[in-house]
């Protein structure tokens, strides 16, 4: 028996697959009950994104990390729920800031209701996460607070943009580390701590998970340019249309060797110019540079993972590294 694929990653070891499947089911159950309120509308709004699905990528990180200790320890599942609630709460807020209309194939909360409902629902999920976290101990509370601080600072830096004296490429990668990598790092740390894994294992898992998170987002950058809609399930050039300067775009602008491409990438790309911009960017060395950056982050993760105890969970983490590279094309 093998577990259902998570982020399309089948787990080969049967015992590990069963442990992960059991853990995912337990997390899903607690996740749903943790947001229930006496107010039916609060419950409905809170379950909106839960029921829309999602990869439960961070949950997987917690469960795999817990394999390096006692994976059945009582805090592991609640810890995974805290991480997932934090992630979901941030999505409600992200959709408001991005004025997104769709999330996970369904209308976003701000589109279905309004911005105020979406913001308050995100706040409610953060509160519910904190309530669960209070039973897990002060060390976990501190890690969560530090992680949340990084999430917010990353969002602020992204919103404000790089300073005049700051390298925009370094700024961008740092934003990814804070906005995405920090919570995935916390996922690995939670799993290790709550399962009683050794301190050196906890540190390796935290670093490796953060690197995987940054690489995953860099893969999304590449997919937005290189993929077809059929391959990725998303419309190619979405970031270009929105004027988001992802890593390939920043490298192309820094090279400044194609006046037409630089002109197109200077702001949001008009619909009539998207195909031309994609064609020029796909052929530009910026794509290879962005891929090399992604692979460098994956190599960082592999270095830490290779030093972990030789158990099936280590192989699963290494397989995930391979997957992150492969999915980017």
Image: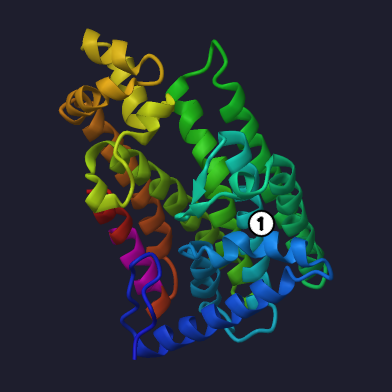
What colour-coding does the image apply? rainbow
Instruction: Decide which of 190, 326 is in the foreground and name it.
Output: 326
Where in the figure is residue 150, as x and y percent of width and height?
65, 42
Q: Which residue is mark 1?
A: 86
Instruction: Decide which of 170, 80 is in the foreground and name it.
Output: 80
Instruction: Decide which of 60, 41 is in the foreground and name it.
Output: 41
Q: Quadrant of residue 16?
A: bottom left
Q: Which residues are magenta?
A: 314-322
Give the vertical position of 125 relative to 263 (above or below). Answer: below
Q: Quadrant of residue 136?
A: bottom right
Query: Considering the image in quadrants, where does the N terminus appear?
Result: bottom left
Residue ranking furthest to the top: 259
In the image, what residue occupies the spot 65% across and 44% down?
93
Where in the figure is residue 86, as x and y percent of width and height?
66, 56
Q: Is 127 situated left or right of 225 in this image?
A: right
Q: Is residue 196 visible?
A: no
In the image, what residue occupies the spot 50% across and 66% down?
61
Give the vertical position of 305 relative to 226 (above or below). Answer: below
Where in the figure is residue 59, as x and y percent of width and height?
54, 68
Q: Could you say whether the residue bearing mark 1 is in a helix, strand or loop?
A: helix
Magenta highlight on residue 321: yes
Q: Is residue 53 visible?
A: yes
């Amino acid at each position: 028996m093998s577990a259902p694929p998570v982020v399309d990653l089948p787990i080969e070891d049967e015992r590990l697959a069963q442990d992960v499947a059991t853990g995912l089911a337990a997390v899903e159950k607690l996740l749903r009950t943790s947001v229930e309120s006496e107010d039916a509308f609060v419950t409905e709004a809170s379950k909106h994104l839960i029921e829309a699905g999602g990869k439960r990528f961070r949950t997987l990180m917690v469960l795999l990390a817990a394999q390096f200790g006692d994976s059945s320890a009582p805090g592991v599942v609640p810890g995974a729920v805290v991480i997932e609630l934090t992630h979901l709460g941030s999505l409600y807020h992200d959709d408001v800031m991005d004025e997104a209309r769709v999330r996970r194939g369904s209308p976003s909360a701000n589109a279905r209701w309004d911005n105020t409902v979406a913001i308050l629902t995100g706040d409610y999920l953060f509160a519910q996460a904190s309530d669960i976290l209070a039973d897990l101990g002060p060390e976990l509370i501190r890690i969560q607070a530090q992680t949340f601080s990084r999430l917010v600072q990353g969002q602020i830096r992204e919103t404000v943009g790089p300073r005049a004296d700051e390298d925009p490429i370094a700024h961008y990668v740092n934003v990814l580390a804070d906005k995405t990598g920090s919570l995935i790092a916390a996922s690995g740390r939670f799993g290790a701590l709550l399962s009683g894994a050794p301190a050196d294992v906890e540190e390796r898992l935290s670093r490796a998970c953060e690197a995987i998170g940054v690489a995953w987002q860099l893969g999304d950058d590449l997919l937005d340019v290189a993929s077809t809609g059929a391959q990725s399930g998303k419309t190619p050039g979405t970031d270009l249309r929105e004027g988001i300067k992802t890593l390939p775009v920043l490298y192309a602008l820094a090279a400044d060797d194609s006046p037409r491409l630089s002109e197109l990438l200077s702001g949001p790309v008009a619909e009539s110019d998207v195909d031309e911009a994609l064609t020029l960017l796909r052929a530009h060395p910026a794509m290879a540079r962005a891929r090399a950056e992604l692979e460098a982050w994956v190599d960082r993760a592999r270095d830490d993972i290779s030093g972990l105890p030789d158990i099936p969970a280590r192989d699963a983490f290494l397989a995930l590294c391979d997957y992150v590279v492969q999915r980017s094309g």
